[in-house]
Image: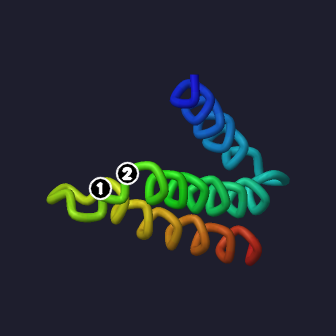
Amino acid sequence: LAVAGGAAVDIALGLAILWRPWARHACLAMVGVSLAYLLAGTALAPDLWADPLGPLLKILPGIGLALTAHVLAGDR
């Protein structure tokens, strides 16, 4: 159930970023959701930090991209 809820939130934010009035807010929400995923993953399965494919580590560039999109959306 948590996976389906997370997927629904991800899809909703992906759609929200396509509509310009909501784009900046969606970017900040993406950062918040990513941080929540990161904290939950760290609390529930801290061994994922040592995984060779880096399932938790790859969240960090996504946060950077969302923040960059937030800044760029404000310039328009």
Q: Could you tell me which residue is drawn at 58 percent across and 65 percent down? A: 66
Task: Name the quarter where the C terminus is drawn.
Answer: bottom right
Which residue is under mark 1?
48
Q: Amino acid at mark 1?
A: Leu
- Disc 2, SS: loop
Q: Give me the disc on residue 45.
A: 2
Q: Quick check: 16 above or below 24?
A: above
15 to the left or right of 42: right
Q: Nearer the viewer, residue 36 or 22?
A: 36
48 to the left or right of 15: left
Q: Could you tell me which residue is drawn at 28 percent across and 57 percent down? A: 47
Q: Residue 74 is drawn in which quadrant?
A: bottom right
Are there few (<14), some (14-19), or many (20+) residues within 10 Å of tag 2? Answer: few
Q: Amino acid at mark 2?
A: Ala
Q: Quick check: 37 above or below 74?
A: above
Q: Nearer the viewer, residue 14 or 32?
A: 32
Report how far apart the C-alphas of labels 2 and 1 lie in the structure.
Answer: 6 Å
Task: Name the quarter where the N terminus is drawn.
Answer: top right
Q: Position of residue 69 (x, y in %)?
A: 61, 67
Q: Position of residue 27 (x, y in %)?
A: 67, 60
62 to the left or right of 36: left
- Disc 1, SS: helix
Q: Quick check: 32 above or below 71?
A: above
Mark 2 and mark 1 in contact? Answer it, CB < 8 Å.
Answer: yes
Q: Position of residue 38 (x, y in %)?
A: 50, 59
30 to the left or right of 25: left
Q: Nearer the viewer, residue 41 or 55?
A: 41
Q: Could you tell me which residue is drawn at 43 percent across and 61 percent down? A: 59
Q: Could you tell me which residue is drawn at 45 percent across and 49 percent down? A: 44
